[in-house]
Amino acid sequence: MVAVTGIGLITCLGTSAPECWDRMVQGHSGIAAITRFETTGLLTRFGGELPAKYYEMENLEFPRRLRNQTISTSRLGFLCAKEAIRDSGVTAAGFDPYRCAVISGCSQSIFQEGQEWPNVADQRYLVVKEMVNAITAWISIKYGFKGPSYNIAAACASGAFAIASAFDYIRSGKGDVAVALGVDMMLNRQSIIGFNELLALSENNDSPESASCPFDNRRSGFVLSNGGCALVLESEGFARKRGAPVYAFIRGTAVLSEAYNIVAPEPTGREIARTIELAIADARIPLANIGYINAHGTSTRQNDLSETVAIKQVFGNRACGLAVSSQKSMIGHTIGGAGAIECAVTALTLRHGIITPTINYREPDPQCNLDYVPNVAREAKNLEAAVTNSFGFGGHNCSIVLEKSC
């Protein structure tokens, strides 16, 4: 088994894992009108911006020269990793730097927050800025981790793919520790225009806080947000040896390609179902042990329906008794960050015995008729295992199975 020993989480709800978790449990929305760049002429003028406190943290951590060498995506990933590593305490223990990996999931690192590349302040560092591998390189340099360091781009599933890759690295015996993170800072004019052209974004400018409503019959598209999350993963033996507290164990993963369409999910749900089934088989735990699905749940018509149908295919008569929820109802869609955020929240769910709600759930969709934990968090002290799903443009599917730590 692979242990989750550290979490670093930054979203529109807060600048740390405890703050984000508390606000999710309370059912808060972090979605609001955009303030950090001009939105005139855009069909969508709202999203999930990071809190003002985040930029204070960024200014303290990145002096002028280092700031000139990085873009906002790298800085966010670094700060998420810093919290996760501190939370885990792994650097205080004796570790072999050649057995410590850093793996990121990011889909679009070359865009600056709020503006289009290459409108950067200092062209001298343009090459360094646009390197997508810079995200993991800065972390490796800071902490002296000399194992594998690379980025995975799998659209909205990037963060989950990074975790699955880190899991395989540790389970193979090649490493003891991996920092796995997902991050994107895509809330900018160009991204909004592009997603609007695909009819993918909600245009509910009159009520942004309720625009993301996964599985609700009123859903009209996802809400674009900035955010990221890092997890420290360790082999169970290494974590136990140093007495590290464990949030949860990752037991199995599956990554597949639907080979269907560049943006649309396969409508019957069979490819999503296959991904979930393979992850549970990889975990080698009974299907009956799964009590919660952390859904991809984007608040788009087809994605939510396909995921619902897939869950029914996998769990049959048990499907209606499963709790299913989506944090995107509160924080929007962070693209490359989503899978890592949702994996971390699943670990916290198992740790605390509380399932975060799907807020803004008001009008049931007759075709989406599962238990979506509507609007209010739910106690789940007996929850033993859970699945978290991530699906990306291009047909990139990933499911991860986590189990409660004793």
Image (cartoon, grey):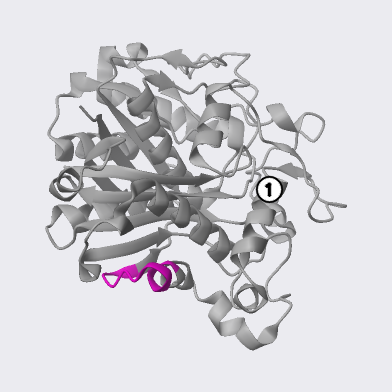
- Please name the residue shown 88% across and 52% down the image: 40
Whether residue 395 is visible, yes or no, is no
Residue extending furthest right? 40
Instruction: Tell me the quarter of the image containing the C terminus.
Output: top left
Q: Is residue 300 left or right of residue 271?
A: right
- Please name the residue shown 33% across and 50% down the image: 89
State the residue position of label 1: 53
Above or below residue 379? Residue 168 is below
The number of numbered badges drawn on the structure is 1
Residue range corresponding to the magenta coloring: 139-149
- Please name the residue shown 52% across and 13% down the image: 366
Q: Is residue 48 magenta?
A: no
Residue 69 point in image, percent of width and height:
59, 78
Instruction: Tell me the quarter of the image containing the N terminus.
Output: top left
Label 1 neighbourhood size at 10 Å, few (<14), some (14-19), many (20+)?
Answer: few
Q: Residue flagged by tag 1: what amino acid is it?
A: Lys
Quadrant in which residue 365 is drawn:
top right
Residue 288 point in image, percent of width and height:
19, 18
Residue 400 point in image, percent of width and height:
30, 40
- Please name the residue shown 66% across and 44% down the image: 199
Whether residue 271 is visible, yes or no, is yes
Q: Is residue 289 left or right of residue 181?
A: left
Above or below residue 226? Residue 290 is above
Residue 223 point in image, percent of width and height:
64, 40
